[in-house]
Image (cartoon, rainbow, N blue to C red):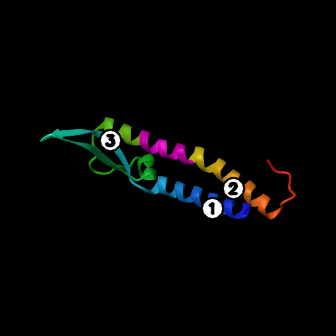
Amino acid sequence: MYRRTGIILVIVAVVLSAWMLTTPVRHFTGYLIGGGETEKLFTTCGKTIDILSGRFDEEVTTPGARGDCVKEARGRVAYVVIVAPPLLLVAGFAIARGRYPNLPLP
């Protein structure tokens, strides 16, 4: 049971990290209000790694939008760095506990 849980946690950490780094970054730009309806507007900035390398999509032209895109991309990387290692550590403990039941682990 512990090994299975650990393997599931590893898969979750890897999939979450891959999803955060490969999905396009979208930045909230405001609301479009008209005709009694309100719609949220987003700007697609590009891929996380591309943004951190300085490459943006064509629709990101203003310096303010570029800065917001960089903040969003850095937030994604920080989320991966903060969430993935502890999740992998817990998964390692679970796998070790399943493989070596008498091992004194936390």
Q: Is residue 33 left or right of residue 30?
A: left
- Comparing labels 3 and 2, the label whose residue is closer to the camera: 2
The answer for how far apart the CA atoms under marks 2 and 1 are is 8 Å
Residue 36 image point, x, y percent: 15, 40
Q: Amino acid at mark 3?
A: Phe
The kind of residue tagged 2 is Ala
Residue 83 at x, y = what percent?
59, 46
Compared to residue 33, the image places residue 11 above or below, namely below
**Label 2 sits on residue:** 91
Give the vertical position of 68 relative to 105 (above or below).
Answer: above
Whole-percent x, y for residue 9 in the image: 63, 57
Report the amino acid beneath label 1.
Ile
Q: Is residue 33 magenta?
A: no
Q: Which label is found at residue 28?
A: 3
Q: Which residue is mark 1?
A: 8
45 horizontally vs 4: left or right: left
**Residue 93 versus residue 24: which sits nearer the camera?**
93
Q: Which residues are magenta?
A: 71-80
